[in-house]
Image (tube, coloured by chain):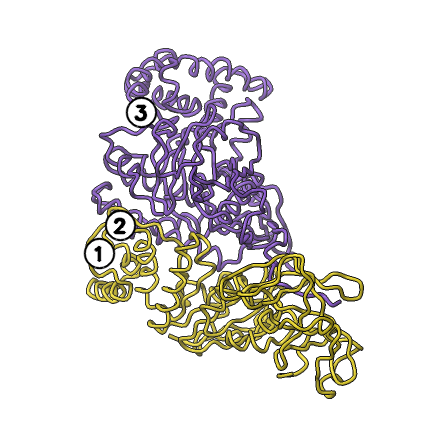
Chain colours: A purple, B yellow
Amino acid sequence: MTETYNANWHDEPTDYAQTGKLPRIRTAPPESALGSLNITAASADPELLDLPWHIALEEWPTESLAALPRGISRHIVRFAHLGGSVIAVKETSEHVARHEYHMLRKLQRLDVPCVEPVAVITGRTTPDGTELDPVLVTRHLKFSMPYRALFSQTLRRDTLTRLIDAQALLLVRLHLIGFYWGDVSLSNTLFRRDAGAFAAYLVDAETGELYPELSSGQREYDLEIARVNIAGELMDLAEGGLIEEKVDPLATSELIMDSYRRLWTELTARESFELGERWRVNARIRRLNDLGFDVEEYVISTVADGSRIQLQPKVVDAGHHSRRLLRLTGIDAQENQARRLLNDMDAYRADNNNLDVDEEISAHLWVSEVFEPIVRSVPRELGGKLEPAEVVHEVLEHRWYMSERQDRNVPMAEAVQSYLDSELRHRRDEAEIMLTADSRTIGLDGDSSFPDS
Amino acid sequence: MATVTFDQATRVYPGTEKPAVDRLNIEIADGEFLVLVGPSGCGKSTSLRMLAGLEDVNSGRILIGDRDVTDVPPKDRDIAMVFQNYALYPHMTVADNMGFALKIAGVSKEERAERVREAAKLLDLEDYLDRKPKALSGGQRQRVAMGRAIVRNPQVFLMDEPLSNLDAKLRVQTRTQIASLTRRLGVTTVYVTHDQVEAMTMGDRVAVLKDGILQQVDTPRNLYERPKNVFVAGFIGSPAMNLLELPVADGGVLFGGTVYPVRNDILDAAAGNTVTLGVRPEDLVLAAPGEGLQVEVDVVEELGADAYIYGHTTLNGQNHDMVARVDGRRPPMKGDTVFVRPEQGHVHLFDTTSGARLAETV
């Protein structure tokens, strides 16, 4: 018998490793899954079974929900409590849910900032047997916020610029590992405060694909999508009076192009210089370090007559400062927070004449004498306002400004107390931002009737 | 509006030897709706992305109209990827939601309004232009998203499994809308799907790919009635065509207890002593005991007027699945043994070694 091809190739196992491929749709679930819940999860979360999967997400009872601000989504998305954390639940089709689940797992393994996939749940039915859409469950990133929740009245231009820079950095990191996003937008990103700037996390990987490497066409198109989407998002904010009037949505959306291109060039461009200018190798690496990247591998070649050197970074890895801070202190912080803390640590070392002491030992002293006392001085009821590393950053800033104003070296304890009383106490909780009736922007996104079905 | 030409277009991924798309040649007419279909890994999405400029073309060319776009950046190709993102903005009206990309592109206010109005008319959204998306139904929101692509007046629409996100009901509905809409607009459309039913119902022509190689590009009817090879024969049609490797006999092909008559010149063209005979479920008829192939009935699917019997036959000591359509009023029962034979003039013969079709008609 020759090989025959029947149309039931739907039953082939899905090769998720295949380049640029969506997993196939199964026309019907296997019989064993019919009428019963089918959970695919990376780790056991028995509490998952306690959630009301037999009810359409739109009708979930309030007691099951965690009131978090939702972004603009074409799907129904709800937040719920799961054990000690908050999860985001999105209703979608099975193959999209599975694709996104596997893609997020891959991205996590590649150490890209993105939300953590928890489970795909299929086979949902109501008690009367009506089929419900499968869901993708992801874990909510603590202290992260959609861009619409980052401002209380209107979005200021400089906040916006910092958001767009964070988005550009995320896009560069994704492109470096060969991820084509296909739907870059502020709505598909979550932001965490990062020492006055923001760190961006990918939330929606529905349209994304991983390739061995991206063509410039793919990168440029992603960038074009980013520009159009950001312009649309800003026009929408402008229409709702939620953005500073001086902000021009179109001009602002162009910023992502510049920010992205500058960063991409610095990270990947081939540089050529005279043989005598070898210091430029180190200078380039230092510039990349300053941008937060480590150079894991680079290629140096000389041109045929040996008169010039060409340098091109091959593998760059984000998180230069985070990794150094983690190595020295065990503190896990965002990149800019880490940069800020490391600066303070270096200053501490110089101030205390510890320069001949091992860096590790000096770092240990800094943690026990600076970092930990500040974190410990935050009363428990204020613990949900900001991440510890962000609090320390803000205290350091606060102390610096106080000292400048009063023209004296304000002691740390005094600065901490002043910060707690004048700053932190007045902030909203950002660990899991709660909805309030009078919050215009959050109320807008929390409108249950809006998300598209 | 324009023609689209794949001219020996080839894509080889870095680090692989086998091309993901191998010397693809397709000429798509102005205004045509062409569907790329095939199993996973066949190269259909890669082909579409090559046209979009999202994949490098390693050799060959791609033309839109007379313009060689092989090295043109995606945004300068005058194409619209449909359904890339259809999240709607809550504060903007339906009209603004449809027209904002034009504003970004610097199109004048008057022209924007005109194009949005035209698109809204086509999409039956005229009465909603001043409303906010909140006031729309799911289907209407879907149409606003489609409107976004339409107002750009692209030369070509590209759609990569655009319906995979929708539930079954909305999928069938939207499928019909897309097909009729693109025809009314007369915009050349290239549409990728893994679903052959979707391909057959939507496409003016359908291109079937496998392993990066174009197998056949033809009208749905021709693909169904004259598949060029055994792959297309098995891929197109649901339930699938029965494909059986049968011995060549004097004056025909031995079909169980019967010789299905075939001209000698056709059989002479086949390499070896066997041919692959394809017969669609609706072209099998129940025969008298001993005549044709003996089939054990495993499942009977009753559809009212018709019924499908799913069973198996034994060829060379091996079980082989068979599907036949029978009269729905007197279907055999599960567990019955029946005999089937092809209707004269309704079989497809393929060379067993190469898989190629042996003759236009048999």
x and y percent of residue B281 in the render? 60, 69
Is the residue A136 above or below the residue B106 in the image?
above
Work out how far the residue at label 3 is from the one at label 2, CA to CA, in angstroms.
31 Å
Question: Dot 1 corresponds to which residue?
Answer: B128
Q: Secondary structure at mark 3?
A: loop
Q: Who comes first in sequence, dot 2 or dot 1?
A: 1
Chain ID for label 1? B
> Disc 2 marks which residue?
B133
Q: Are marks 3 and 2 in contact (CB under 8 Å)?
A: no
Disc on res. B346: none
How many residues crowd around disc 1 within 10 Å: few (fewer than 14), some, or many (20 or more)?
some
Q: Is residue B24 left or right of residue A438?
A: right
Q: Secondary structure at mark 2?
A: helix
Residue at 59% from the left image edge and 78% from the top image edge: B226
In this picture, residue B259 sits left or right of residue B123: right
Chain at tag 3: A
Tell me, yes or no, whether dots 3 and 1 are on the same chain.
no
Q: Going 44% across and 29% down the picture, which residue do you hit?
A: A337
Please tell me whether mark 1 sits on a helix, a strand or a loop: helix
Q: Position of residue B26 (x, y in %)?
A: 53, 75
Local crowd size for mark 2, using a 10 Å CA cut-off: few (<14), some (14–19), many (≥20) = many
Give the left or right position of residue A449, taking residue B222 as reference: left
- The answer for how far apart the CA atoms under marks 3 and 1 are is 39 Å
Q: Position of residue B9 (x, y in %)?
A: 56, 71
Give me the C-alpha separation between circle 2 and circle 1.
Answer: 9 Å
Under mark 1, the amino acid is: Tyr
> What residue did someone put label 3 on?
A428
- Comparing labels 3 and 2, the label whose residue is closer to the camera: 2
Residues at circles 2 and 1 in contact by the CB criterion of under 8 Å = no
